[in-house]
Amino acid sequence: MSIKPWEHTEISSLKGKDILTLHDLTRLEIEEILKKCETVKTMFNLGADYKPLKGKTLGMIFQKSSTRTRVSFEVAMWQSGGYALFLNSNDIQIGRGETIPDTARVLSRYLDGIMIRAYSHEDVKILAKYADIPIINGLTDYTHPCQVLADLFTIQEKKKKLTGLKLAFIGDGKNNMANSLIFGCSKVGMDITIASPKEFLPDKEVVDKAKADANMNGSKITLTQDVYEAAKNADVLYTDVWTSMGQEEETEYRKEIFAGYQINNELVSVADQSVIVLHCLPAHRGEEITEEVMEGPHSVIFDEAENRLHVQKAILSLIMG
Ligand code: CP
Ligand code: NVA
């Protein structure tokens, strides 16, 4: 009897695992997610009937707005044969003070997994500690691992490799995207340079944590205030909003301090000639990126956004399937 590729019974180390940061995953686990993503994307494009999450329910708790994360997780569950439940944190008792441990224990009796977008990473760690089901971080103040898995998948798709490439991140080096890119690149052996104003260079805690992985995988983490130094010969240019969700009162100050930390045609011209430009979105055209670059020949930003869907399916089927 022939076994179809999606019917193999091998138990992955990801089964039942929380996805809180990429630092917590092994390189092999990250590679497994990317490999699975390739399979699910191909199968989806061929119209194959693949329903590894039949009968499974994902709860999705949101404390902050979302377009991509919400829609891609919800559609990923539906297309994989499961069901997704949108839970605005203001509509459930957590918004009225029910504790996270109690919520975790109750929801574990109903659901097969929880995806949460929260302000505080510590809250997500508490949820994971008390839940008996896998918890997926859909963005916190500290990290955004599912976004970076989609980014790594996109880079691999376009460049046919990850190890040995150089990624330059231009913008807020202390935000969730910078942290996750530092963790992710170090795991897969990509050099990463962060260009930020002095007071927004990455926290030592993040760099120190990632350094062990970078050393083991032969890659470098470089911090600079000079955007041109960062972009020089880069294979991937990456940026994110100057003001993240929850920091709105700092918007005007940030506009001043980040002026110049922008991906524009001049910056693209110092990168490798086949550089690809990524942005997690939403974008503020004219601030961290220009309209010309967003819509220009180096931008793979909308392929990157599409890949959120395929990566969510890979993550969900590996941890909950
Ligand atoms: N990139 C990202 O997470 O987008 P949303 O905030 O729309 O989910
Ligand atoms: N740094 C941004 C990422 C949005 C996907 C934020 O937290 O708002």
Image (cartoon, grey):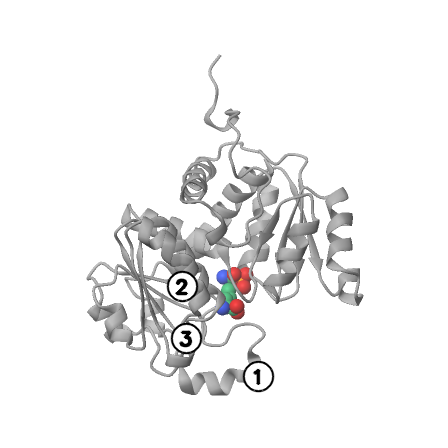
> Foreground mark, 2 or 3?
2
Q: Amino acid at mark 3?
A: Arg
User: In 3D space, how far apart are the residues under numbered discs 2 and 3 (Cα atoms)?
Assistant: 29 Å
Residue 142 percent across, percent down from the top left: 53, 64
What crowding class fits label 3: few (fewer than 14 Cα within 10 Å), some (14-19), or many (20 or more)? Answer: some
Q: Nearer the viewer, residue 50 or 8?
A: 8
Q: Is residue 197 left or right of residue 59?
A: left
Q: Nearer the viewer, residue 308 or 139?
A: 139
Q: Amino acid at mark 2?
A: Val
Q: Residue 249: which numbered mark, if any?
A: 1
User: Which quarter of the figure has residue 109?
Assistant: top right
Element at label 3:
loop
Give the quadrant of the C terminus: top right
Vertical side of 86 occupied by 224: above or below = below
User: In 3D space, how far apart are the residues under numbered discs 3 and 1 (Cα atoms)?
Assistant: 20 Å
Specify whether tag 1 is near ligand 2 (CB below 8 Å): no
Q: Residue 207: which numbered mark, if any?
A: 2
What crowding class fits label 1: few (fewer than 14 Cα within 10 Å), some (14-19), or many (20 or more)? Answer: few
Residue 29 percent across, percent down from the top left: 45, 41
What crowding class fits label 2: few (fewer than 14 Cα within 10 Å), some (14-19), or many (20 or more)? Answer: some
User: Which quarter of the figure has residue 186?
Assistant: bottom left
